[in-house]
Image (tube, helix red, strand yellow):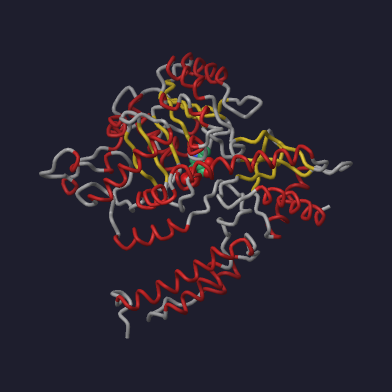
Amino acid sequence: MTDKLAIPADEFRRIAGQAVDFLAAYYETLEERAVLVPTTSQEIRRKIDERLPPQGADFDELLRTFRDVICEYARHNAHPRFFGYVSSPGTAITAIGSMLAAALNINATCWRSAPTGTDVEHLTIDWLKQMLGYPAEAAGLLTSGGSMANFAALAAARSRKAPVNVVREGMAAAGRRMCLYVSEEGHFSIAKAAGMLGIGEANVRFVKTDDQLRMDADDLSRLIEADLAAGHLPFCVVASAGTTATGAFDPLGALADVARRHDLWLHVDAAYGGFAALAPSAWHLFERIAEADSVTLDPHKWLYLPVGCGCVLYKDPAAARAAFLHGAEYARVIGLERDEAFAFWDYGPELTRPFRALDLWLLIKYAGVERLSRAIEENIACAEYFQGLVNVSDDFEMLAPVGLSVFCFRYKPENFTGDLDLLNERVLVEVQHAGSTYLSNAKVRGRFALRGCVLNYRTTKSDMERVLEDVRKAAAVCI
Ligand SMILES: Cc1ncc(COP(=O)(O)O)c(C=O)c1O
């Protein structure tokens, strides 16, 4: 009988080989699959429900269940026509990286616990700073995603700008409402972080946007002045470098000027758009990124990493330490020099952390930056090509200009007099059901939009043509 915990090497080779063979075939036939096979939660539970197993099973049997249920009914985010949300396809090389990282099971808390894990993370963070054009003296760490990176950045901003030590004394000791500014198109993780940090969601001011859905710097100034006049304490502006709904890119320079004038912290949420800095056509948007006090980036979005890798950068590492430094005796680092005494827990909320940097290191080294920038530029070109197709069609219209690689549009047949929001909602459900293309939805100035985000190096212009065909087919069923 094989020991199911300490698996012998030959058995490990055999079953890992089976898993790799399955994945190779999966990648090879991905495009032939439906993006999503319609099912229900009840149906899935019926296929996997069983009693807590007292004894182990054969791996062959588990791989069959993985193939026939878990994979079969998954939404295939790596499919070239999966355009929903802001979702990376992952890569084959990082599938291998995740297995290597799990085998070493490095706990990236600090250098003492993870000497190589820590130095690889420092190295990859340095590379991310170079990609973005962010100052070399900035510090950063990898997080579970953009929401946690935004949370960490706002914690640093709060500590730096509060009139007292709110980490120790609590927010009531600040004595005034601390106000935070984000555009009405900003991601909901900002308001959520404000709630968790005791800043209060009611103290998040939603700034108006211009005709391209970018934050309006004049409205920002007006809101700050009004809060000052009311005796509140404005402390932070959050700019979006690529909004979730339409890809709008806030004017960093104008917002940096307002922030500096009022001595506010400038955080840039570049969770979605940050890696567009690698695309020559978008680089100009990042011209003044170095003025940001902190930045959120999500390698698990537009750097194609698998789910679970965000990043926060702090221009002044001391601000992060003021928010997160804690000195429990069991964590005290003894007898090490400065570099070796480094601990990630001084810069973010987590203690135990997976070795996220391995996938990042592996992908950047394996693919090289030139290949990555070419893929990102092609994603932008696909979205713009799609906009061109819509603009010359008789039965579609764009609802917002393409922002980076996001397209928002709707089906609008000639002579249709019914409710376009309702029609497009039905079309969306039908498109998702049909399985050839997957779009998600957004509201643009109150109108229901079919929304897509090109975030996959497999997607080509012919896939973009296919989107319109698929939507027409779905609409024929709905009208
Ligand atoms: C602009 C923006 N910020 C933050 C987030 C949150 O990132 P995550 O899902 O990695 O927590 C998203 C997610 O789509 C986003 O688009």
Q: Position of residue 89 (x, y in %)?
A: 53, 53
Place residue 392 in its image quadrant.
top right
Q: Is residue 94 left or right of residue 388?
A: left
Would residue 64 be visible to someone looking at this image? yes
Work out which residue is located at the far left of the displayed protein and give it. Answer: 335
Q: Position of residue 234 (x, y in %)?
A: 44, 21
Q: Position of residue 228 (x, y in %)?
A: 46, 16
Residue plotted at (32% across, 46% down): 350
Front position in the image: 206 or 150: 150
- Answer above or below: position of 443 versus 471: above
Front position in the image: 269 or 226: 269
Residue plotted at (54% across, 66% down): 26
Q: Is residue 401 left or right of residue 417?
A: left
Residue plotted at (78% across, 42% down): 396
Q: Position of residue 179 (x, y in %)?
A: 45, 25
Q: Quadrant of the N terminus?
A: bottom left
- Answer above or below: position of 426 versus 149: below
